[in-house]
Structures are given as structure tokens and as C-alpha cells.
Image (cartoon, helix red, strand yellow):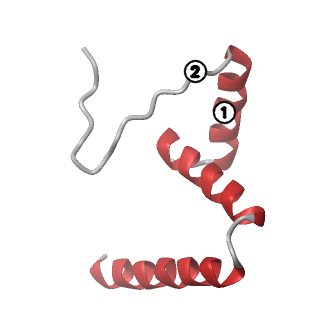
Amino acid sequence: MKRQPTSATARIDLEITPETRARFNAIHKNLGFKTKPETFEALVFSITTKDILRPDVVARIERKIDEAIKILDTVL
């Protein structure tokens, strides 16, 4: 039975080699993220911020993350 995604998620199917899957699993283990989607998101974010995003965009993203963390701190 296939896993049904929750309303806040979307499924992405990728065709990768066994070697690529092994590398991803190793990265996931080494980075210590809780889930593989978190690891995938971190990799995509890291790649896109290297040379593509302007510094002001990165700064805005960082501010939003900081704001979200502050809100979570007050809730938790």
C-alpha cells in the first residue's frame, strides 16, 4: 500500500542510480536530519544559494527563518 501524503506535502519521484541512492543515504546519515525530505530540502537550498540567489534574497530568507524560530520558541 502506497503512503498517502499529508495535505502539507507533495510527492516527488526521482529516477536515480543505486550509487546515487547510496550517496544520498550517506549524506542523510551524516547530516543528521530527522527525515529524508528534510535532507533533500537542505541540499536543494544549499545548491540554490551558492551562486543563483542574490545576497538580498538570502538575507530575507534568513530573516524569515529567524522570525519563525522566535515564534516557535515562544510557543514551545
Which amino acid does the dot numbered 1 rest on?
Answer: Phe
Image marks 2 and 1: residues in contact by CB distance under 8 Å: no
In the image: residue 58, left or right of residue 4:
right
> Can you see residue 1?
yes
Q: Position of residue 2 (x, y in %)?
A: 28, 19
* Mark 1 crowdedness (10 Å alpha carbons): few <14, some 14-19, many ≥20: some
| Residue picked out by circle 1 | 24
Q: Which mark is residue 61?
A: none
Please, is residue 58 above or below residue 14 in the view? below
Image point (57%, 79%), residue name = 62
Q: Of helix, strand and loop, which one carries label 2?
A: loop
Query: Residue 54 or 29: which is nearer the viewer?
Result: 54
> Looking at this rendering, what residue extends furthest in the right direction?
51
Kindly indicate the quadrant of the structure image that contains residue 76. bottom left
Instruction: Tell me the CA gap for discs 2 and 1.
Output: 13 Å
Query: Do we see residue 35 in this rendering?
Result: no
Q: Does label 2 or label 1 sit earlier along the sequence?
A: 2
In the picture, the disc for residue 15 is: 2
Tell which tag, 2 or 1, sits nearer the viewer: 2
Residue 71, horizontal then vertical, whole percent: 35, 83
Rendered residue at 68%/15% (across/down)? 18
